[in-house]
Amino acid sequence: MSTLYTDFIQNRSGQQILPPRGNVVQMRYNRLDTRGAITFHSRSWEDNGGRFPMSVTLQNISSPDNLALIIWNITWESNCGSSQGFVVMRDGNFAPRSVSSESKGFEAYWDLTFAAGYDGDDSSTPHTHCMTYLGRIGKTGNVEYQLKIQNGSDGQCNNFYYNRPVGNSGSDNNEVGVSSVVAFEIGHDGLFLDN
């Protein structure tokens, strides 16, 4: 019996079909330069209005065991401060490991992947948060990742302002910014994460 060791396997067109463990297979980047506001219902993950208007798609995933490493830099502000937060969505559903194993799904509006920060200024100084997600991709083909926004206040704070402060969309003493996301597909053999 012989044993063959290789760094990767590729098809005739040169695409790696079994990437080496731990190597970056692909990288995708997206940037949102526009400024705007999102209005959504309080205390309900079911509201599609809470989707952040920037996503990233990993394309032609070759193995469901590969990992996705997603890094968001989001510039935002809310008139509600720290009661808003984010959860990671994969193809429109909660991404694995994005909420607690005790989560009650869409009823658990308080179960966040990333909690919001708060600096005490609700009108003129947006926040910039860096958020990182690592999880098994779980399928082949194309996979879209997106953030969803939620808050725990009942009937209040339904506006989320991106790349701008609450007060206006940019002037003296009212900073604006940009948001971006970068996604990596990382070759993996399934031994590190269980879902």
Image (spheres, rainbow, N blue to C red):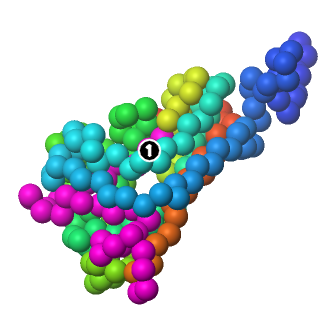
Q: Is residue 55 left or right of residue 86?
A: right
Residue occupying the far top of the picture: 1
* Looking at the image, residue 154 lies above or below residue 64: below
Q: Residues within 10 Å of mark 1 (few under 14, many from 20)?
A: many
Q: Front-most of 101 and 110?
A: 110
> Is residue 82 at all visible to an observer of this figure?
no
Residue tagged 1:
146
User: In this image, 101 relative to 186: left or right?
Assistant: left
- Is residue 55 shown in magenta? no
Q: Quadrant of the N terminus?
A: top right
Is 11 located above or below residue 35 in the figure? above
What residue sits 31% from the left and 44% below the top?
101
Main secondary structure of the magenta stretch:
loop
Task: Please tell me which residue is depicted at 52% across the width and 64% down the height of the picture.
Answer: 178
User: What's the magenta region?
Assistant: 145-173
Whether residue 172 appears in magenta in the rendering, the answer is yes
Looking at the rendered structure, the secondary structure element under dot 1 is: strand
Relative to 182, 149 lies left or right: left
